[in-house]
Amino acid sequence: MKNLAHAIFKTIVDEYGVNGAIEKLSYPPWFQSLSCALAYDWHSSGTTTVVCGVLKSVIDPEEFGIGVAGGKGKASRNTLSDIDAMGEKLKLSDCKIEELKYASRISAKVDNACIQDGYQLYHHSMFVTEKGEWAVIQQGMNSGNRYARRYHWLSSAVKRYDEEPHQGIVGFLQDNVLDMTSKESGGCRNTTVDLANAKPNELERAYKELEGSMNSIKMIQRGQKTLSEFDGVSKEANRCKNVADVIYRLPRRVNWDALRVAYDKQPANYEQFLCIKGIGPATVRALALIAELVYGEKPSWQDPVKFSFAFGGKDGVPYPVDKKTMDETTEILSNALTEANCIRKG
């Protein structure tokens, strides 16, 4: 895998340049095709973690003009120190290095807190060029169904971190996903910022009142029969009620200390609000529900998945790895690149 990955990327950088290389990585179908070309586990969750790990091991910044930071689990927590080391090799300015660190942090915060799809991030890789352009590939795991979801970012495509910043999201499409990055959530984001700038005790009181009213509604729903239960459409009514229960489920805990910090800082926009330490999924959801249920500013509940793939099995699916053909392909690519360079020099 390492030999073939090295040959492929040497060819790609030669043909498309460093920016073209990370553009390809940020495009989910291309990344998926790369994993299949490298013969790793077809469409398993390991596609992301192992392929990114292989690329990190073979892409030398001084050779390719591209560096790779982060990885799976503990390696993801080393992303910022990796960026420092990579920035030195790529001769990036201190200002650019700080921009990269910010991009790494905010992309992780957005996918973990603003898109509430049930997937907890455990992998974060950042690809950086000598020109300071970057791509982020990160993955989350749903502990309930054991499926993974992959999120792709590209710096040149990001106009705003808090509004539809992704190149693509790969996974199974599902219902009732809170997507605060959707354009449809714009009004809700603005109201959230207004709420964050309000006095924390007033906000906490409003939340408790909302919590009490929601509990009262649920008690009434449990004990009271409706006309729909007598006219043959009770299943549909129950389905709608269950959907509402999922969407309007209030978080058990809200970080009121973080909201007190937000009040002191008075964020000017939603991105600044997200950057406040302690603002996580529960607080994002709580303020979004207040914005909708009290002020009528609805967020989007549509899953932002743009690319969906079926997940196959490991070990020989769709067929066993043909190591001989892999080695031959590696040699062909390497020879072709050498000949192309000789022709150019000649």
Image (cartoon, helix red, strand yellow):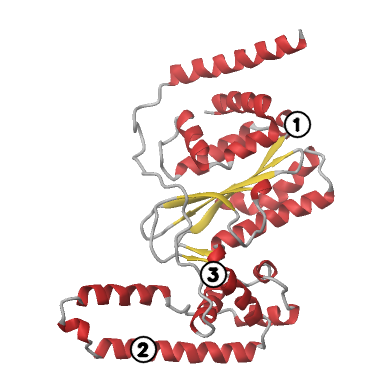
Tag nearer the camera, 3 or 1: 3
Asked which secondary structure carries label 3, the reply is helix
> Going 41% across and 73% down the picture, which residue do you hit?
247
Look at the picture and state if 65 lies above or below 190.
above
- Dot 1 crowding, Cα within 10 Å, few <14, some 14–19, many 20+: few
Alpha-carbon distance for marks 3 and 1?
39 Å
Horizontal side of residue 330 vs 198, given as left or right = left
> Going 40% across and 44% down the picture, which residue do you hit?
309
Q: Amino acid at mark 1?
A: Glu
Percent x, y for residue 138?
55, 50
Look at the picture and state if 296 lies above or below 183.
below
- Dot 3 crowding, Cα within 10 Å, few <14, some 14–19, many 20+: some
Q: Which mark is residue 327?
A: none
According to the picture, the residue beneath numbered tag 3 turns out to be: 281
Percent x, y for residue 287?
56, 78
Query: Could you say which quadrant of the image residue 89 lies in?
Result: top right
> Pointers 1 and 2 in contact (CB under 8 A)?
no
Look at the picture and state if 334 lies above or below 251.
above
Chain-order first, disc 1 or disc 2: 1
Percent x, y for residue 76?
60, 51
For this orientation, the residue located farthest to the top is: 346
Task: Tell me if residue 70 can be seen.
Answer: no
Look at the picture and state if 45 lies above or below 145.
above
Chain-order first, disc 3 or disc 2: 2
Horizontal side of residue 222 vs 170, given as left or right = left
Alpha-carbon distance for marks 3 and 2?
24 Å
According to the picture, the residue beneath numbered tag 2 turns out to be: 217
According to the picture, the residue beneath numbered tag 1 turns out to be: 62
Chain-order first, disc 3 or disc 1: 1
> Going 65% across and 52% down the picture, which residue do you hit?
158
Alpha-carbon distance for marks 1 and 2?
63 Å
